[in-house]
Structure formats: C-alpha cells, structure tokens
C-alpha cells in the first residue's frame, strides 16, 4: 500500500498569510480607534444626550403676541437694566405655549392672580413673546425688575423638556445674553430666587442644569 505525502505550505505562503493577518488586525484597530474618537467627540456631559449641542445664540424666530396692558399680567412697567435671565417651567404638563399665553391674557378679566412671562417656549420649540424684554413680567418675584423670564412647556410630570423645546431655549437664552451683555452665570432658575421647585427637572437634576449652562455658554460665544 502506498501513501501520498501531504504537501506542507511553503514558508513564503505562510509568511504572506501572517502579514495579511497582521494588516487585518491593524486595520481593525484603526477602525475601532476612529469609532471611539467619534463617539467621544459626539458625547455629552449628561445622560440626556445634551450638554455639547453647539447651538448658536443667533436671534430665534419669535411669534410676537404681546399681552394687553393690565395690572394682572402686563403692568407696562419699564425696567432700568437687565441683569439676568430666569428659566421657569409651566407646571402644567402637555399644555401648549399658546394655551399658556392665553391664560396670561385672560388674567386681565379673571383677576385671580398676577402671573406672566416675557417668553414661552412650546413643546415643538415655538417661541411666543408675551411681554417686551424692557418691561416687567410677573414671574420671578423680587427679580422681576432686572431679569427676563422664559417659561418652558413640558410633556409630563417630570418637567423634562422635549429636545425641540430645549434647543429653542438654549438659542433664545444665548441670544438674550448677547443682547444684554450677560455671561452664562447670569442665567438662573426660579429656584435660585425663591427656592421654588422650578424648573423642576433642572432643580432635581443638577448635572442637567450644568449641561444647559454649558450649552448657553457655547451659544453666546458663537452667536451674534
């Protein structure tokens, strides 16, 4: 009985295979490195996917619907200067910016309380201006006389803002800071004035508030 000797791969073929495997390993490593860098550059400072959105503080589109001058929501009192921007949440989940604006308007006839805001940012990112920035709004207690107030709509009880709301809020806040020569540390919460849990999500999630301020700082640095 005869046996056929099995042919062994030559050293040249073996060397080629080794080099090919090495190049494949290097290519895979480079791909993984590029993917890692891209992921890190796209990451944000909090778990909400926010904090480095690179939104510019250019003038946003405003739907100007000024309230009628009245003692309950638009007293018509002019301010001497603006020294801060105050962020609020509406505390009525699911309500639209238009509904909140209409509520402020009807206070002139219902006379049930004094309340208003210079701006309201809606669930879809729309911005309604209710009161000129050079007039007092009934929103921030003892800071009414030197601040601009922004109310934000929210979909549920957590007070967390929709992405469209958040983006418009950053752009509007950045633009107002530029307009009045303010830095990002002049942007405060209603909570910082009175201790009220407003805006709720930014009070209960300090990292989200820091991320928001970081976005505002970028916006005013790259705005107009």
Image (cartoon, rainbow, N blue to C red):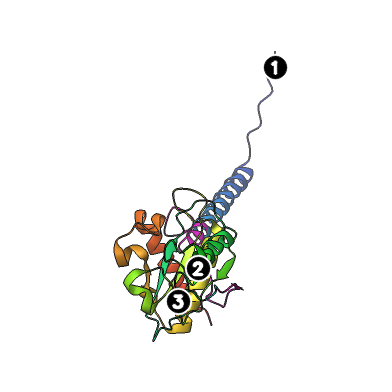
| Nearer to me, 220 or 54 | 220
Range covered by the magenta-colored residues: 39-66
Q: For the residue labelled by badge 2, is the local secondary structure a helix, a strand or a loop?
A: helix
**x then y, percent, for residue 115:** 43, 66
Q: Residue at x 33, y 59 (%)?
A: 196
Q: Nearer the viewer, residue 123 or 162?
A: 123
State the residue lying farthest toward the bottom: 80
Q: Is residue 94 above or below residue 169?
A: above
Q: What's the magenta bit mostly, secondary-structure-wise?
A: loop
Q: Please state, as top left, top right, bottom left or bottom right, where the N terminus lies in the image.
A: top right
Q: CA distance from mark 1 to mark 2?
A: 110 Å
- Residue at mark 3: 75
Q: Earlier in the sequence, mark 2 or mark 3?
A: 3
The reply to whether callout 3 and callout 1 are in contact (CB within 8 Å) is no
Q: Quadrant of residue 62?
A: bottom right
Badge 2: residue crowd in 10 Å (few <14, some 14–19, many ≥20): some
Q: Which mark is residue 2?
A: 1
Name the mark nearer the viewer: 2 or 3. 2
Badge 2 is on which residue? 108
């Amino acid at each position: 009985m005869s046996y056929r000797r099995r042919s062994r791969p030559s050293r040249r073929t073996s060397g080629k295979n080794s080099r090919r495997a090495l190049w494949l390993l290097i290519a895979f490593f480079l791909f993984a490195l590029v993917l890692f860098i891209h992921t890190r550059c796209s990451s944000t400072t909090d778990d909400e996917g926010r904090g480095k959105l690179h939104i510019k503080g250019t003038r946003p589109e405003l739907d100007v619907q000024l309230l009628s001058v009245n003692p309950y929501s638009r007293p018509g009192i002019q301010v001497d200067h603006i020294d801060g921007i105050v962020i609020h949440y509406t505390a009525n989940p699911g309500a639209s910016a238009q509904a909140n604006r209409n509520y402020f308007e009807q206070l002139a006839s219902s006379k049930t309380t004094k309340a208003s805001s210079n701006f309201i940012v809606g669930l879809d990112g729309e911005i309604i201006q209710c009161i000129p920035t050079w007039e007092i709004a009934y929103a921030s207690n003892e800071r009414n006389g030197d601040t601009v107030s922004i109310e934000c709509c929210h979909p549920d009880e957590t007070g967390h803002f929709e992405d469209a709301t958040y983006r418009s809020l950053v752009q509007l806040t950045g633009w107002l800071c530029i307009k009045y020569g303010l830095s990002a540390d002049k942007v405060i919460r209603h909570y910082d004035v009175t201790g009220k849990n407003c805006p709720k999500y930014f009070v209960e999630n300090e990292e989200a508030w820091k991320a928001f301020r970081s976005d505002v700082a970028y916006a005013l640095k790259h705005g107009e």
